[in-house]
Image: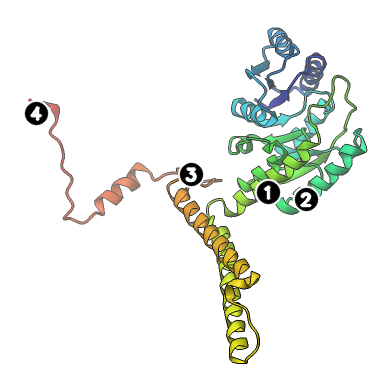
Amino acid sequence: MDISVVVPLYNEAESLPELAEWIERVMDENKFTYEVLFINDGSTDGSWEVIKELNSRNPRLKGVSFRRNYGKSPALNTGFERAQGNVIITMDADLQDSPDEIPELYRMITQDGYDLVSGWKKKRYDPLSKTIPTKLFNATARRVSGIHNLHDFNCGLKAYRKEVVKHIEVYGDMHRYVPYLAKNAGFNRIGEKEVKHRARKYGTTKFGLDRFVNGYLDLLTLWFQAKFGVKPMHFFGLLGSLMFLLGFFAVIVVGALKLYNMYSGNSYRLVTESPYFYLALTSMLLGTQLFLAGFLGELIIRHSNDRNHYEIGEETSAPTAIESRRHVNDLPSTVQVESKPSTVEAQ
């Protein structure tokens, strides 16, 4: 199968028939073999009934319906698990993404060799209250992720090589950072295509300004997991050691100043009367706790089932039977392999 189109949706009953017809027309014109996966994220407006009607008319238009609203990331992850096409296209259901972009996105994956191509809505039809925070958000995401060629991380219109979506897990609200997840999984050929942004035709947006706050927190989580996920001691241990040493030397300085003033005949205060003494103790305590947090993190990682999970790109063929027998024959003569009697002998 050439293409799987994954469409997460929530209360988009009005736009679904037009979107389905548009996708079908593009696929037929380009003679693609395809499937469309509508992931209904707990809609309450009859979207699921529309999807079932579309499926009865065209079996290639498939649907999955959640019992309640979980969010865009779980919807995408569910679509990725079920996608069978060599190239997976994601788009929103509100008709702001154009299916006419699909052929070029497909070409960039299959011919230009990209693992992932993200859309860039250079000209947007959103109010300034959304465009300005979006630009700041994308600038921060570029800096933290190291993917400097992407201008719009949150664009719903993206294309993926099949191997990419089968090796990443989209959870929480991480749909904003699928390129970052792909990069962390070892898929570094990430491109961008300028796409048209169409004004919303039906309904209203399902996302508020809180997505920017949550987006920064998710970005911080991904950065930490990518850098220290399997070696937490490198972060907590280093930070804890620095804080402990800072507090320790501060205590020495406070004590040395008291001794100096005492032997010089100057007036002095007790060490416990100095606020710097308590600040130093607090620093030492926090440093110790951070160090222990790193130590406990290492113990947890050591017993994790994924501690030795690595993404393997390619592998040569396994040893042949002849090579395996050769290795057995090369064993020392003191090693003997007992052979069990056959069924006939046992009788």
As measured in the structure, the alpha-carbon distance from the residue carrying label 3 to the one carrying label 1 is 21 Å
- Point out residue 316 in the picture as x, y percentages from the top left corner: 48, 47
Screen quadrant of the C terminus: top left
Q: Which residue is mark 2?
A: 140
Going by the image, does 307 lie left or right of 191? Answer: left
Q: Nearer the viewer, mark 1 or mark 2?
A: 1
Residue 111 visible? The answer is: no
Residue 320 visible? The answer is: yes
Q: Which residue is mark 3?
A: 306
Q: Which residue is mark 4?
A: 346
Instruction: Determine which quarter of the picture holds residue 67.
Output: top right
Work out whether 239 lies above or below 263. above
Q: Amino acid at mark 2?
A: Thr
As measured in the structure, the alpha-carbon distance from the residue carrying label 4 to the one carrying label 3 is 46 Å
Circle 4: is it few (<14), some (14-19), or many (20+) Cα within 10 Å? Answer: few
Q: Amino acid at mark 4?
A: Ala
In this rendered view, identify the residue nearer to me: 250 or 229.
250
Screen quadrant of the N terminus: top right
Q: Which residue is mark 1?
A: 220
Say which label, 4 or 3, has the lower sequence index.
3
Circle 1: is it few (<14), some (14-19), or many (20+) Cα within 10 Å? Answer: some
Circles 4 and 1 in contact, beta carbons < 8 Å: no
As measured in the structure, the alpha-carbon distance from the residue carrying label 3 to the one carrying label 2 is 29 Å
Say which label, 3 or 1, has the lower sequence index.
1
Q: Amino acid at mark 3?
A: Asp
Q: Identify the residue at image location x=79%, y=42%.
A: 192
Q: Amino acid at mark 1?
A: Leu
Q: Secondary structure at mark 2?
A: helix
Outermost residue toward the left in this view: 347
Instruction: Determine which quarter of the picture holds residue 331.
Output: bottom left
